[in-house]
Image: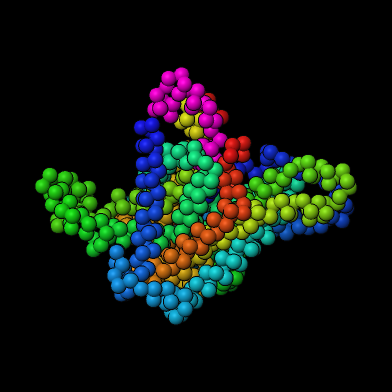
Amino acid sequence: MTVAHDLAFGPTGPTRATELPTGVSAGRVGRAVQGVLWAVVLAFCLVPLILVVVISFGHKVEGAGWEWALTLENYQRFIVGANWPAESTSLYLGQLYWSMRYAVVASLLAVVTALPFTYLMTRQSRRAQAVWLVFLLATLSLSEVFIVMGWDIILSNNSGLPMLFAASGLTDWLKETGWFDVLRDWGLANPRNVKFKPSEVATVLTLSYLVWPYAVILLYPALSRLDPSLAEAARTMGARPWTVARTVILPSVRLPLIGTTLLLFVFLLGAYVAITVFADPSQHTTAVSVYEHVRGSTLNAPFGAAQSVILLITATAFLVIGQRLTRKSPGAQ
Amino acid sequence: MMLRVLGTIFMSLAAVVVALPIVIVCSAALNGGRTMFFPPQDSTLARFGEFFISEPVWTRALTNSVIVALGAATLSVLLAWPIAYRLWKTGSRASALLATFGSIPFAVPPIVFGVGLGFFWSFLGGLGTIPAGIISHAVLFLALPLVTISIGLQAIDRAHLDAAATMGATEAVTFRTIVLPQTLPYTISGFFFALVLSFNEFIVMFFVSASAFATVTLQIFNSLRNGYTPTMAVAAVAFITVSIVVFSAIARWGDLPRLMGADQSRT
């Protein structure tokens, strides 16, 4: 996910190559090259994904890996559990629910905070923009493991914020004013002090942090193309800043806004490290389960594959719904 | 006026929050002991020596990371060039489809593609080998050079092409004298995007490596269970430095705002 989606591949670009003279032999070579390219792309880009789909219908052999099959047992297990109809469990559906919940909340949080930031950034000089972009790209490319490490140090109970809360007397103040009990209700405190790990808040914040630079970079093209004279005109006619934002800026970036949220959502569906570190095991996601079934303690590749397919279907479903939303509404660009 | 102040405050706040975890990890690299403290205790640079020189676990992982990233970035640029070029040249439906297929690995959740590559390589017998890791990353990040090179090709001045065609230049000559030089910054940008992201990638490499080799990010993930050590923070310092240097270089010699899709009419 990133710029790739934002740029229309194909013959819509601003400049097109003029047809240059091509010899007969060059045409033949071109066709050969084209054939090789197709073979390579199909083999390496599509075959792995097709394998996932095919293996998701496979059958696990006790103690001996798995075999090819055409069974729906892995999908059935996902929906009602392995021992259905004797007993049913919604464990895996619950994990999918948490996947979606984290992804929706974190992507919305990222987009809502990134929008004003990106808008302000595009009003700066080209040079300043380049500096910001370098900074954002550097944090964006920084591996998930480092970012989780950083937040872990900040949020863990023996160092970072909880210690700061206790040392500064903020914990005592919270206890006096009664907010401490509220925090305990939210799962953000143990009897002695505040705690942020494990908690949904910490998980969502870290996930949101992970995709925030992506949000800025995806919103950047649309906002930088926004004609500043529109907002100025509205201001001149006496519109208040909030009205300008609501009636001029927001409508013109509505599509990229929805698109960005969807892309962040898809990306977050597969988040793994942050969830294992910050989320309570009862609130783990499908991605964690995939990992455990394919490589972890409970080796069951077909079931892991089936869960991957369900992640893919979820992602696709959200993308399709998003596209419907943007297409139906009037006034779309 | 009031609004401008609020805007500045908001921007600074955002910068602080974005920088905070990174600054904390980096400063933890200075710790003298084996545990992560913030602020660091008895500051030393000894951990840097461990990471880069003396600790074989980390030096091996670093070598693997560098090999994979360089190999994958080179390979993905080599693969992206003909695809992007044919798309720009012919604009045909087939070449657009090819470019779309090439971008698919980047668009699906990485864990799904990682699982798929794990199956793929176990069938081909390459699971756990470095070449498999290189090819996997090259495919995963193919979309990046594909996009930057496409942007570069579209930026070529049409008049130059027309002039070349009028003067009877063959496709090869035009390619060598106009297309290649004018798109070089974009090619290099694509190379570095792929390089940096490959360097930092973790989940796909986890499935492809099958624990037979470790890159730095894998090594860190494997060590997470035993708690953090300042040596891991050194890795973070090294990685963020590489990213900043690379992206600054792209900003300096390439057109970063344009690559990111900024409007060209305003400067």
Q: Which residue is drawn at 62% across and 52% down?
A: B254
The residue stretch that appears in magenta: A219-245
Q: Which residue is drawn at 81% across and 51% down?
A: B174
Is A224 in the magenta?
Answer: yes
Q: Which residue lies furthest to the left in this view?
A: A176
Is A73 in the magenta?
Answer: no
Q: Residue furthest front?
A: B1
Judge by depth and name the residue closer to the eye, A83 or B75.
B75
State left or right for residue A60 relative to residue B136: left
Residue B102 visible in the displayed image: no
Q: Where is residue A214 in the image (x, y as percent from the top left)?
A: 48, 48
Q: Which residue is drawn at 79% across and 44% down?
A: B160
The image shows a total of numbered marks equal to 0
Q: Which colour scheme is used?
A: rainbow
- The overriding secondary structure of the stretch rendered in magenta is helix
Q: Position of residue B73 (x, y in %)?
A: 60, 62
State left or right for residue B223 relative to residue A56: left
Q: Where is residue A268 in the image (x, y as percent from the top left)?
A: 43, 50
Classify B22 as above or below B97.
below
Q: Which residue lies furthest to the top in this view?
A: A237
Classify B211 as above or below B137.
below
Residue A206 visible in the displayed image: yes
Q: Which residue is drawn at 37% across and 37% down?
A: B5
Judge by depth and name the residue closer to the eye, B106 or A154.
A154
| Image quadrant in which the C terminus of chain A is located | top right
State left or right for residue A109 relative to residue B118: left
Q: Where is residue B27 in the image (x, y as percent from the top left)?
A: 36, 64
